[in-house]
Image: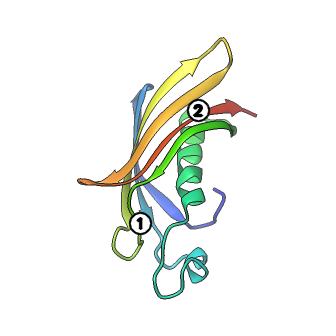
Amino acid sequence: MLLKNFYTIVELDYSDKENVKAIIDLNKDHEVYEGHFPGNPVVPGVCLTQLIKEIMESVKDKELSLVYASNIKFMAVVNPEVNSRLQIDLKVKYDTEEDIIKVDSVTHFNDQVFYKFKGNFKAK
């Protein structure tokens, strides 16, 4: 975990290796919000990308590197005081020829979409 105590995984379902679902709880009292932004906390976009990487590392049980991101869209601000629980749905494809994991992800809760990500990871 890049940021200690930034989040907790509540549920991680990867019984279908091509459709991963994670539910996480954000720690609204984490120190990252002291600088981003005091009095109006917002989850940094880089942290949303890191969440996807760390979930895939849990699924694969190995360290991964982000090698390519073709589409990153911020759809709405994640304020941990308002939206402390997030669901991250990942559609995963494995390119064994190039040893790459292709991920297409949506971070949301209920009907509110916060973040869309499409990129490739590779084992370190």
Residues 121 and 68: in front is 68
* Image-based side of 14 in relation to 58, left or right: left
Residues 27 and 90: in front is 90
Question: Which tag, 2 or 1, sits closer to the chain's start?
Answer: 2
- Classify mark 1: helix, strand or loop: loop
Residues 54 and 12: in front is 54
The residue positioned 59% from the left and 17% from the top of the image is 95
Which quadrant of the figure has residue 12?
Answer: top left
Q: CA distance from mark 2 to mark 1?
A: 29 Å
Image location (x, y in percent) of residue 93: 50, 23
The residue positioned 63% from the left and 66% from the top of the image is 4
Q: Which residue is mark 1?
A: 77
Q: Are marks 2 and 1 in contact (CB under 8 Å)?
A: no
Give, as a three-letter code, the residue at label 1: Val
- Tell which tag, 2 or 1, sits nearer the viewer: 1
Q: Residue furthest left?
A: 111
**Counting other residues with Cα less than 10 Å from the Cα at mark 2, is it few (<14), some (14-19), or many (20 or more)?**
some
Image location (x, y in percent) of residue 59: 53, 36
- Give the numbered dot on residue 118: none
What quarter of the picture does the N terminus occupy? bottom right
Q: Residue furthest top?
A: 97
The residue positioned 65% from the left and 36% from the top of the image is 68
Image location (x, y in percent) of residue 74: 45, 55
Image location (x, y in percent) of residue 63: 69, 39
Q: Which residue is mark 2?
A: 60
Q: Is residue 56 above or below residue 74?
A: above
- Classify mark 2: helix, strand or loop: helix
Give, as a three-letter code, the residue at label 2: Lys
Which quadrant of the figure has residue 80?
Answer: bottom left
Q: Residue furthest right?
A: 124
Q: Is residue 93 above or below residue 116?
A: above
**Counting other residues with Cα less than 10 Å from the Cα at mark 1, is it few (<14), some (14-19), or many (20 or more)?**
some
